[in-house]
Image (cartoon, rainbow, N blue to C red):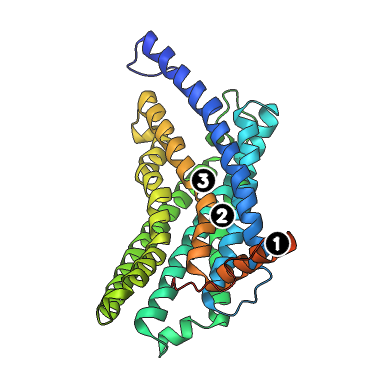
Amino acid sequence: MDYTNMTQTEQKSSANVSSVFTHQVLPVFYSIICTCAFILNGLAAWIFFRIPSSSALVVYLKNMVVADILMLFTYPWRVAGDLGYGGLQLKLIVCRYTAVLFYLSMYTGITFMSLISLERYFKIVSGTSGVSYLLQRVSVAKALSLFTWAVMMFFMLPNTILTNQPMPEVFKCMNLKSELGRRWHEVSAHFNVGIFWMAFMLMLFCYTSIACHVYRSLKRVQRERSEARRRSNRSIFSLLAVFVFCFVPYHICRVPYTLSQRRKAGFSEYNHFILFQLKETTLFLSAFNVCLDPIIYFLMCRTFRESLLQKMFSVNRQNGRPSIGTGLSITIL
């Protein structure tokens, strides 16, 4: 690739970094998280879909499991493409289908994270009266879930349909898009970034309010309840911590990278290269979310936690091991 304003040595060095990092190092990391996430999310799905949808929280968490499994399905395709298997046809499948599914699943999961924070806010801070009671109903949660999937599909699926150009001489996903496809790609990218920052602001508000409410409530009890306070805070902030770690870095660099994909934006080839490396690195953090979400399920959902522990103790009893945790009482929110 011809990088503007770079010496020949710098061009060669940059090309080597791109080859080693994006085509050798990242595929190994994706393979590792794919294996771990397959086990964790398989277990989560096995437990969750044996649990009735008895609350809005369970409905949203089940939808998060579905989004994570769909997202996880795209990793093997990406790994195979980055390692050079399958040729241009596999890269075409990645650009047209699995990359779109990846982003559809990721932003759907982000939306459900924000809905979970809103549900927790209404349940803990607002109680069960008026609008808060309505939004905690299972039927309303199911309707919001369907609406979320419908809106995300409306914005994302055209990226598949409009990736319809003949195979270019220089293969890039953007070169496979029509002019309308390039414009829709930019619109959908900015829409997704807007969804992210709205979700982030909503989660900050909800969890700050919850933390203040819990602190005021626990301040009135005896000091020996400090352990319960610590567990409550750990449960409250687990989702926010995962959200910040996985998604904030990527969204800081996504907007300039999206602009750099259109030559009219005034980015040099070298700047585009740097933004691409940053985008790929931070995107990996977003992909790592599928390994951390099962921790959220365990900390936030008592039904999920009790079902998992019950299965573990049942296996221990079948293997002749003492079930030391049978009488365990967990007080996390």
Q: Which residue is mark 2?
A: 105
Give the camera-side residue of 38 and 311.
311
* Left or right relative to 330: residue 74: right
Residue 90 appears in the picture as rendered: yes
Q: Is residue 272 left or right of residue 290?
A: left
**Residue at x 56%, y 38% (from the top left corner):** 30
Disc number lying in front (1 or 3): 1
Q: Secondary structure at mark 2?
A: helix
On the image, which quarter does residue 3 sit in?
Answer: top left
Instruction: Using the numbered discs, state the Cα–Cα distance from disc 1 to disc 3 in whole angstroms.
Output: 31 Å
Residue extending furthest toward the bottom:
129
- Dot 1 corresponds to which residue? 315
Q: Visible in this render: residue 177?
A: no
The Cα–Cα distance between marks 3 and 2, rounded to whole angstroms, is 10 Å
Dot 3 amino acid type: Ala
Q: Position of residue 183 (x, y in %)?
A: 48, 46
2 vs 1, front mark: 1
Label 2 sits on what residue type? Answer: Ser
Residue drawn 37% across and 13% down? 10
Amino acid type assigned to the residue bearing label 1 in the image: Val
Closer to the eye: label 3 or 2: 3
Label 1: few (<14), some (14–19) or many (≥20) C-alpha neighbours in 10 Å: few
Upstream in the sequence, badge 1 or badge 3? 3
| Residue hosting label 3 | 287
At mark 1, the secondary structure is helix
In the rendered structure, the answer to whether residue 140 lies left or right of residue 45 reads left
Q: Position of residue 90 (x, y in %)?
A: 68, 33
Proximity of marks 1 and 3: CB atoms separated by less than 8 Å: no
Q: Residue at x 39, y 49 (%)?
A: 245
